[in-house]
Amino acid sequence: MVSGLVMRDVMLLALRLDRLVPGLLDGPVPDAALARHVADEPAADPRLLARRARTLVAELPASGLPPRRARYVEAQLRALECRARLVAGDDVGFADEVAATYGVDVRCEDPDRYRAAHRRLAELLPGRGPLASRLSAHREADRIPPDRLADAVEAMAAHLREPVVDRIGLPDGESVTWEVADGRPWTAFTHHLGGGRSRIAVDASAHLRRGQLLPLVAHEAYPGHHTQYCHAAAAGDSLPELRLRLVHSPQGLLAEGAAEAAHHVLPGPGWGSDAEHVLAGIGLPLDGGLAEAVEDALDDLGRVRQDAAVLRYARGAGPDEVLAHLRRWLLIDEARARRMLGFLDHPHWRTYATAYAEGRPLVTEWLRRPGTDPVDGLRRLLDEPITPGDLRDDLARAAG
């Protein structure tokens, strides 16, 4: 196997598996001709696809790929093998599924970290009554009026796009079309159309808050997922592996981690004042400093949903125990906790909380390495084949 054929074989494998599990691929099909070829084939046996993934891994040393690119492709292949085994009905343990799919070890957070986040929230939101009630009242007061949601999103996107164009770069003709949806299971969703164009929907029924709007738009568009798609397409001529984007993969974990960290890079620390300025321009008041402090505290609760998945799938906890865990640490009501549990209980998504829970802190720590520029680091994540293991190695070297 020579390097020019490596990605053709990997893409064929991914397309055949995506036919069995629609939604495996993230973004446009990387090769339309191969997609048509696979569509004309009989559906593949998932066990044969798992075996093919192992064969391709074994052949990588002779592929001619440089070591870092080979590690990246191997990580994607191991994720595909795991997904094929699951489709075939194999009993894959939760921790093993996480390790094979995302290239990280699953772990529960120390509850003391959650308690510290609760103390910070209590200081930020003084008043009578339980903290959960005070946070609920804050969220209610912070809601964007439904009839202003489209204006708020458009204004925030326009503000965030400028520094991305200047410091990271976007292709000519790049654009995002924003839509307001209702009753969806997600808060926002980016669908990349190819050619530097994306359609991003935000869900009105999610009751978006002013304080979360800038991080959300950064996550989905600038410099988050939409920007990631644009850069992957541009780099694909020389690094075709970047065009193959898999939802459940080490690349998927780093994509979510980079999107979660995006607003800490551009605009960067002090982003609350940016949000306050943008929303004031359309008549929506916001205390930007308070918003930033509250969102930063909530970020420290980021592993709660992964904890819930561990309880559910590694420790055999029932739904009541999982709901209680979500409600206690996330300070949410039962309806919202049940919505999260429904997501965790979907077999296609049971491990996906890890993409956020482990992706964000890993990417954030890597971007903050002494002597490095976070913008340059983010650009590398957009333009290079990098695995979670590469980031861990860089962090170990930085620590001496």
Image (cartoon, rainbow, N blue to C red):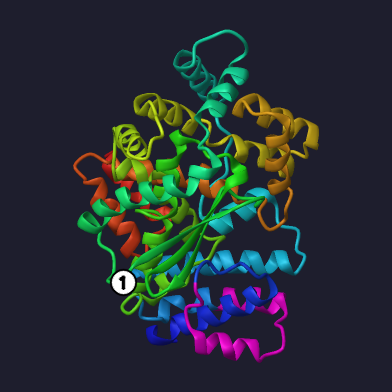
Residue pointed to by mark 1: 173
Q: What stretch is highlighted in magenta?
A: 28-55
**Which structural element holds mark 1?**
loop
Query: Percent from the top left, x then y, of residue 383?
Result: 31, 64
Q: Which amino acid type is shown beneath numbered disc 1?
A: Gly
Judging depth in this view, the residue of 366 and 126 nearest the camera is 126
x and y, in percent, of residue 52 in the image: 61, 79
In the image, residue 180 sits, relative to residue 211, either above or below, namely: below
Q: In which quarter of the image is residue 386?
A: bottom left
Residue 344, magenta (yes or no): no
Q: Residue at x 67, y 37 (%)?
A: 308
**Badge 1 local density, few (<14 within 10 Å), some, or many (20+)?**
few
Question: In this orientation, does residue 396 appear?
Answer: no
Residue 134: give x, y in percent of width and height. Answer: 57, 18
In screen coordinates, is 133 left or right of 153? right
Q: Does the magenta stretch include residue 47?
A: yes
Of 386 and 348, nearer the camera is 348
Residue drawn 32% across the image and 64% down it: 384
- State whether residue 93 is above or below residue 75: above
- Location of residue 234 in the rendering, given as x and y in whole percent from the top left corner: 32, 73
Judged left or right of residue 91, residue 36 is left
Q: Main secondary structure of the magenta part?
A: helix
Does 133 appear above or below 221?
above
Quarter of the image with the N terminus is bottom left
Q: Residue at x 34, y 34 (%)?
A: 280
Residue nearest the viewer, comparing 49 with 367: 367
Picture quarter with the C terminus: top left
**Number of numbered discs overlaid on the protein picture:** 1
Q: Which of 95 and 201 is in front in this view?
A: 201
Residue 109 visible (yes or no): yes
Which residue is pictured at 42% across the width and 54% down the height?
A: 389
